[in-house]
């Protein structure tokens, strides 16, 4: 397989992965409704599923597809690195400015990717009915 064919295969897989991630997001948001929305629409004991999987199962698949997409994205960047650096050099002629912009970009990207590992959720008491939902 030559480089052009490999690029095409990676780009095609990235597109399919992105559409699957979006579709699963829509499935979890609008079909397999979360708690309160499910209760309002279907009643208290509704357990929603699609193809035998509930919204948490589909959420795990959504996450794994996200990991796969990130892997494909890294491959895509590696294969296009010379093009990326060449275009960036044309856009920002000053070498020092290029390094600063690149550094800020990498730091922001890393922060966006890693912030969930550095936060803690707000925990509130769900009240007397909470035990019912965990049966």
Image (tube, rainbow, N blue to C red):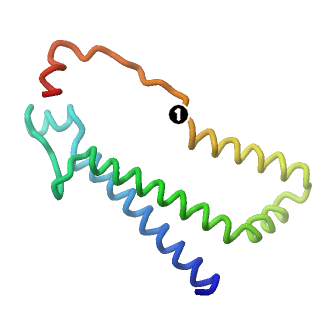
Which residue is at a point 90% across and 49% down the rendered structure image?
96
Side of 90 relative to 69 (left or right)? right
Q: Position of residue 107 (x, y in %)?
A: 70, 42
Which residue is at a point 28% across and 14% down the rendered structure image?
125
Q: Position of residue 119 (x, y in %)?
A: 51, 27
78 w.r.t. 56: above or below: below
Q: Position of residue 23 (x, y in %)?
A: 33, 58
Nearer to me, 122 or 41: 122
Side of 110 relative to 85 (left or right)? left
109 w.r.t. 122: above or below: below
Nearer to me, 108 or 65: 65
Which residue is at a point 77% across and 46% down the rendered structure image?
103
52 w.r.t. 40: above or below: below
Side of 102 relative to 73 (left or right)? right
Q: Position of residue 126 (x, y in %)?
A: 25, 17
Quarter of image, res 6: bottom right
Identify the residue under disc 1: 117
Task: Work out which quarter of the rendered image holds the N terminus and state it.
Answer: bottom right
Callout 1 crowding tier (Cα within 10 Å): few <14, some 14–19, many ≥20: few
């Amino acid at each position: 397989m030559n480089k052009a064919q490999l690029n095409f295969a990676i780009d095609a897989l990235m597109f399919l992965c992105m559409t699957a991630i979006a579709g699963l997001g829509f499935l979890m948001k609008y079909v397999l409704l979360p708690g309160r929305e499910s209760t309002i629409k279907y009643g208290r004991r509704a357990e929603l599923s699609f193809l035998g999987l509930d919204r948490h199962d589909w959420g795990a698949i959504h996450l794994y597809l996200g990991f796969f997409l990130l892997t494909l994205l890294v491959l895509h960047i590696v294969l296009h690195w010379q093009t990326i650096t060449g275009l960036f050099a044309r856009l920002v002629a000053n070498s020092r400015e290029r390094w600063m912009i690149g550094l800020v970009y990498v730091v922001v990207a890393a922060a966006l990717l890693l912030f969930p590992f550095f936060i803690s959720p707000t925990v509130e008491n769900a009240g007397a009915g909470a035990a019912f939902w965990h049966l």
